[in-house]
Structures are given as C-alpha cells and as structure tokens.
Amino acid sequence: MKLLTVCIPCYNSIMEMHKAINSCLLMKDEVEVLIVDRHSHDETLQVAKEYEEAYPETVKVITTREDVPFLKIALEHSEGLYFKILQCFDYLDQPSLVSVIETIRDFIRIQANLDVLVTDYKYVIPQEKEKRVSYKNVFPMETIFEWHNIKAFHKHFQIDLGSVIIKTSTLKKINTDEENIFYNELTVYGTIPYIKSMYYLNVPFHCYGTRRKIHISKSNSYVDLMKSLWDLYDVYSLKSRRQRSYVIEYLSKVYVITVYLLLRSNQKEQIELLNAHLGFNDPKLYKALTKRVYGFLISSSNEKLYGMLIKVFEKVYQLEIEE
C-alpha cells in the first residue's frame, strides 16, 4: 500500500516538471506519483510516460482535457492513504519527505486516526532570499489535536494548500455536485467539515519555486470561486467555534480579493450582484463576513483601501498581481 499520493498537474510543463517529479522519488516505495497531463501541446506527456516506464511501481500518468477538473480525475486513480497536490513548478524538500513518510508510518503502526498532516512550507525563488512560513505559533506540536486546540490565526493567514496532506478518503467526501467545485482552494476548504484530527510536523515540506499570482483577467473566476465556497456547506452547522471562525476568516480573504479584482477590471456591477447572491443565500453569514472585512470598506467600494489590503496579501502570501 502506498502511504502518500502526490498529484502533479501538468500543462506544457516540460521545463519545470523534472524537479517536481524527481523530488518525490526518494521514498518511491511509499509514494505514488500521479502526473495529470491536461492535454499539453509540447513534450510533457511523452516525458511523463518515460517516468512511468522507468518507475512503473511509483509513477502513474493520467491524461485529461484542459477543462476537466484535474483533482477529480486524480482522486479516481489515487491509491495512496494520504493525498497531496504539488504544482509542477514546485518541489518537495527531501529531508522533510523522509519525516512525512515516517510520521504517517508511525500513525499507521499505532492505529491512530489522522485526517490531516500539516507541515510548514517555504519559498525558494531564484535570486531571492529563502523564506519559510511556519505554524509553530498556531498548532500544538508533537501531538494529535482538534480544532479547539488551535490558537487564533492572524487575520487572513490560513492553512496553505502547500501545507496540507489530507487523508484520501476524507478528500473524497467533498460534495462534487457542481462542475466547478474542484478549485485548488477547495482541497482545504471543502474538507473542513470532515476534519477532526490533525497533526503538525515542523518541517518545510513544500517548496514554492515561483511567486503565486493573481490575474486581474480572472476576476470572474474568483466570483465563481466565492459562490462555490459560499454554497458548499452550512458554516453554522460546524460544531467547533474555532472551526466556524476559521471558515469565516477564510471567506473574508477570498471576498476581499474578489472585490478588489472586480474593481480593478471596472466591474462594479458584478460586486452588487455578488453581494446580492451572498446576502440572499445566507444573510447571517454575510453579516459576519462584512463585519470581518469591515463593512464600511465594502459599502464604500473604495479602490484605494482595497489596494492597501491586497498589498498585505502580497506580502504574506507572496502574491503578484498581473493584468
């Protein structure tokens, strides 16, 4: 049985994919590598097949259309007990990979249920100083914990996608009725109602090789994302107060980014439509959301104030804004 499935979505990734794939092979007996090629036009698929031939017990190649959610396809083929997404321009820290596999192995040995393993991550960007992002001031260390054991997150600082290793069976519980449900962000957000037990491993497992970018041209995609998050489940059905608070804070982050992008692309009418959708579908949650992101900012639609907020996101999340 494979302990960990690492899913690597690829699209015209011939220049970046080698480092990502090779970083998974140190523990190849315990790791399954799923390369999901999204109908590339270069030699990505050919190279992926070469890895599959060289490591038939470890690497599996899946092809899908560009418009098909890669995660949904990957979960159908995954055989690992736990699941992680690794973008093709990122890679895994090798000592951390050993620690992750040993930790999963230990939990299996003692027959302890673990829904999520959380690790630190770091940015390793050429010509820039390496930066590590740690959760040591938020999560308990060296013990299984639940939501009520978590300390308060700083505003708009949530669990990063690169930090999470989720039990595959837990990930498969996400409601998949909607076509657009498999945004990367939903990997964490969608599983929150099913996450009970967590463990924090203080190692920088995921290495980001580039800055993450927000494209102004994708503002409508953020609107779809916001609606998908909003309608996915009833936030107030979550039993843990800390869990509910975390979800509302997460939604506030996505909301502010979405509104900012709509302002930048001069789509103020879309903001009104989005607010109407959110307020109509869950008035209580909308009130809590606007309180979190300061109602006067939202009602005023002040682009300059949103610009100040997005600069905070850029600093914390290493995001770049592109036209």
Image: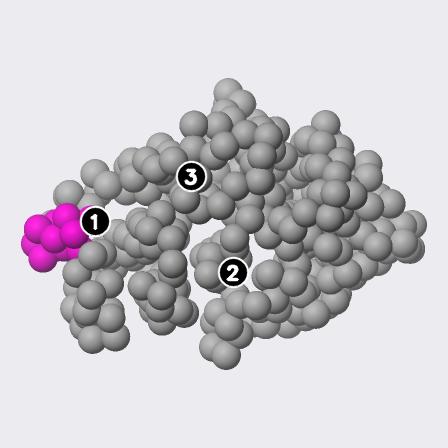
Residue at image point 31% right, 63% down: 236
Residue at image point 38% right, 58% down: 239
Q: Secondary structure at mark 2?
A: helix
Q: CA distance from mark 3 to mark 1?
A: 19 Å
Q: Are marks 2 and 3 in contact (CB under 8 Å)?
A: no
Q: Which residues are magenta?
A: 290-301
Sequence-wise, the earlier of marks 1 and 2 is: 2
Q: CA distance from mark 2 to mark 3?
A: 16 Å
Instruction: Please state if 303 lies on the left or on the right of 238 as rendered.
Output: left
- Depth order, front residue of 124/195: 195
Q: Quadrant of the N terminus?
A: bottom right
In this figure, which residue is indicated by the disc labeled 2? 194
In this figure, which residue is indicated by the disc labeled 1? 292
In this figure, which residue is indicated by the disc labeled 3? 150
x, y percentage for residue 109?
Answer: 78, 43
The amino acid type found where label 1 is placed reads: Arg
Indicate whether residue 99 is drawn in magenta.
no
Q: Nearer the viewer, mark 1 or mark 2?
A: 2
x, y percentage for residue 301?
Answer: 12, 55
